Image (tube, helix red, strand yellow):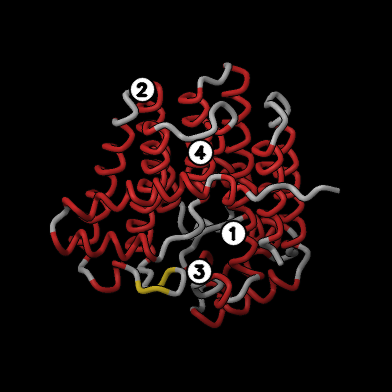
Amino acid sequence: MTQAPNLLDLVRDDLTRVEAKMRTIGAHAYGPMAEAFLLLLGSGGKRLRPALALAAYGFYADRASEKTIAVAAAVETLHTATLVHDDLIDEALVRRGSTTLNAVWNKGATVLAGDYIFARAAGFAAETDNLPVVQLFAETLRIIVEGELRQLFSSRQWRQPKEAYYPRIFAKTASLFAAATRSGAILGGATPEQEQALYDYGNHFGLAFQIVDDILDYAGDEATLGKPVGGDLRQGIVTLPFFYYLSAQPDPEQVIARLGTGAEGVAATVSAVRASGAVELAFSEARALADQAKADLAPLPEGPFKAALADLADQALARKV
């Protein structure tokens, strides 16, 4: 069987252009803000969100247009802004092994830094001169903020129904993946069917990606995650593995009482979830969503981008190991 091309390899040259675009923020920002933003870029992840925007456009053109570079920069800059605010809300001092802005700046300055980065992301989106893309960007920002508020106000509500989980992870993660793929499709001139297919792919891929993240918070290790395990429980966030674990307990209230005893109770619960069948049940849902993401690609033309996106869905599951 021929090995699928790697998505990041397919868009590497255009990702370099996106990176350069994002670094222009540092050229015009207030000194400490410019320095902080460039440090944030340097500690960034794999740039999956801009890569997805570029891939969606790649179905229709060999080289990304300047407007596509702008929208790819917009989604990654928006993602960076959400991380700044997330670290502040979570009181996180480390992310991906690097010190967070929250650890070195006071709360007010950190909030304003996140706001500044949001504004620059919106500026990049506006450079597309495409009203549907700008509207999609604004709607995605609304969804992300509303989802974060829902998560904050539901903290430590351990008996949440499973139905509350998926809207939350759509807001937190999948909405931005879906916005990236839809934006690339719009700028590439996709048919309505293909545009919807790429949006659906981004959504289902993003949901699978976040479920695996939530699994790793129990089944991973600090070296892999770049942050301590059990963070969700410490913050009172109910994710899919915990839902399955609690649902299987003959006395759920005993588990909830244990969580109220502090760090030792949280650590014991993390170990119990890891040892139960809850992780595999959650992973089975991630697998089904990854399979759906691959099925979503059916209306798209055959070629390296279709193969790479299908392979990316499988890679999201491989992060479990």
Viewed as shown, does residue 272 lie left or right of 31? right
Q: Most extreme residue toward the right, as rendered?
A: 1
Residue tagged 2: 130
Viewed as shown, does residue 128 lie left or right of 288? left
Secondary structure beneath disc 2?
loop
**Which circle marks residue 296 in the picture?**
none
Q: Nearer the viewer, residue 53 or 177?
A: 53
Residue tagged 4: 54
Q: Could you tell which of marks 4 and 3 lies nearer the N-terminus?
A: 4
> Three-letter amino acid code at disc 4?
Leu
Secondary structure beneath disc 1?
helix
Q: Nearer the viewer, residue 313 or 157?
A: 313
Residue tagged 3: 231
Q: Most extreme residue toward the bottom, as rendered?
A: 264
> Three-letter amino acid code at disc 1?
Asp
How far is the residue under mark 1 from the one under mark 4? 24 Å
